[in-house]
Image (tube, rainbow, N blue to C red):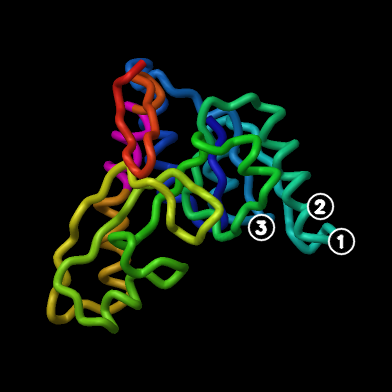
Amino acid sequence: MVVLISGSGTLLQALIDASRDPAYAVTIAAVGSDRPGVAGLERAERAGIPTFVSRVRDFETREAWDAALTEQVSAYAPALVVSAGFLKLVGTRFLQAFGGRYLNSHNALLPSFAGIHGPRDALTYGVKIAGATLFVVDDGIDTGAIVAQCAVPVEDDDTVDSLTERIKAAERPQLVDYVGRMAREGFTISGRRVRIGDR
């Protein structure tokens, strides 16, 4: 698989750690980012994983960036592409190449609180349960078929930072578990239903 990141790479690190076990049976072929110099790229480099950077501002159009990103990821012929904190929306070309194989982990219980401020929006709304959602990316914003969800209770004294960190703690094992199962056992998508183990 290829993992795409934008920041510190804590979700990536969980995948790196899992992939060290031969029984996990998943290899991270490369890690890509839309930002140079982020900690997630350093994590990959320390693990001996090839990295690449594709910045939107280096291209004349968003479509040109999308085409370049598609080519960079395609060079590794991944069975799965995982967005692990990648804060850019891919375009038509990317989805044509990796549709049905591009997964994203989002720090809210979709369809509630889509977008980049899930924990903040959940706190503002006053929900009692937050969480994380793993889904198959489509051409909407956090609208794809849901693979898995985990619940995280919201505490009375939670801040955006504290809730975010507790969601991450639940999100990491969910991502590792389901990505591994999808890679090893296969999966099918029928409408909005994702079934694992239909290989």
Which quadrant of the figure contains the C terminus?
Answer: top left
| Residue found 58% across the figure and 46% down from its top | 42
Q: Residue furthest front?
A: 191
Residue type, numbered disc 2: Ala
In the image, is 35 to the left or to the right of 7? right
* Label 1, label 2: how far apart the Cα atoms are: 7 Å
Q: Are marks 1 and 2 in contact (CB under 8 Å)?
A: yes
Q: Residue at x 17, y 67 (%)?
A: 129
The 10 Å Cα crowd at callout 3, few under 14, some 14 to 19, many 20 or more, is some
Of tags 1 and 3, the one toward the viewer is 1
Write down the residue under mark 1: 60
Q: Which mark is residue 64?
A: 2
Q: Residue at x 28, y 60 (%)?
A: 109
Whether residue 168 appears in magenta in the rendering, the answer is: no
Q: Nearer the viewer, residue 130 or 39?
A: 130
Residue where numbered disc 3 is placed: 35
Residue 67, image x, y percentages:
76, 45
**Residue at the spot x=43%, y=56% of the render?**
143
Residue 129 to residue 94: above or below: below
Residue 96 or residue 155, whichever sits in front: 96
For label 2, the SS is: helix
Report how far apart the C-alphas of labels 1 and 3 lie in the structure: 17 Å
Does 173 lie within the magenta span? yes
Mark 3 / mark 2, whichever is N-terminal: 3
The stretch in magenta equals: 172-181
